[in-house]
Image (cartoon, grey):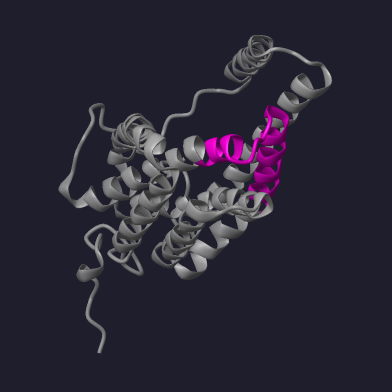
Amino acid sequence: SLQWLPKKTAPVTMGKMLSVASFAQLCAFGLVYLCWKVFNLEFSQIFAIVGGLTFIATLGIWLAFPKFDGSVTQHKKLILRKRYWLYYALTFMGGARRQIFVVFAAFMMVERFGFKVHEVAVLLIANGIITMIVAPLVGKWIIKVGERRVLIVEYVGLFLVFTSYAFVSSIWVAVGLYIADHALFSMAIGIRTYFQKIADPADIAPTAGVSFTINHIAAVAIPVIFGFVWIWSPTAVFLAGSAMALISLGLAQIIPNAPEKGREFRWLEPKTA
């Protein structure tokens, strides 16, 4: 997407793409709810049905659409560049934050508040609806105020949500926090559009591979490490998430107001009178 989208309109288009993806998730969660609650199917049956539908849809897309080549030939090997270090750091922290939501926030809803499969599916449906509405608006907001301000709002919001997770005792407050947590995901568009603005065009594909790897380092490490912490204290897991949000907030301060190649960090911005 970053190879094809114009920099000026990329945030809005990516917001629309996220909205479409949320609609697809909405359909999937609705199917899970029907399979589990109405048709009383087992996990194995649901996975078989959804896996088969995914395979058929993928095959249909492959046959129906032509192959598009990017406007700039991409480097064919993974590349690490010193000037992309802030993007790498934000990506790692974003991966860690996602795991706390996907693994431990969901686990909290099940373990502490007794949510069943169909009830979690309803929560995820609500998240999908909200993302469909919020994501395009976030894209417009990024264009208006810039990546740094949007990401600052996200990380402040995450700090408040994670800290509240640590001490929440009301099921309805927990539901509100879970939905708010997911709604903040849309603002991560700012990380990708920041990279698009500072990157060499030929670096986009290989750096996407690097960021995917960095993201999954967190995806592997966080559930294992924090899983042991959870046994000792679930509160400590969420307070650690609050600390991660503060680290991300500090990193976001480094993003310049108008990032571009040669102006990757805030201290590289020209001094104003």
Quarter of the rendering containing residue 146: bottom left
Q: Nearer the viewer, residue 95 or 206?
A: 95
Establish if 13 lies above or below 99: below
Q: Is residue 120 shown in magenta?
A: yes
| Residues shaded magenta | 105-133
Looking at the rendering, which quadrant does residue 138 occupy? bottom right
Q: Does residue 201 appear to the left or right of 79 in the view shown?
A: right
Taking the spot 34% from the left edge, 52% from the top edge, the residue there is: 244
Residue most extreme to the front: 232
Image side of residue 33 versus residue 200, left or right: right
- Find residue 93 and report its horizontal and vertical position in percent: 34, 47
Residue 268 coordinates in the image, percent (x, y): 20, 68
Give the percent coordinates (x, y) of residue 15. Answer: 57, 50
Residue 187 visible within the image: no
Q: Is residue 263 left or right of residue 122?
A: left
Which residue is at a point 62% across and 14% down the rendered structure image? Answer: 51
Report the predominant secondary structure element of the magenta stretch: helix
Task: Residue at the far left: name it.
Answer: 82
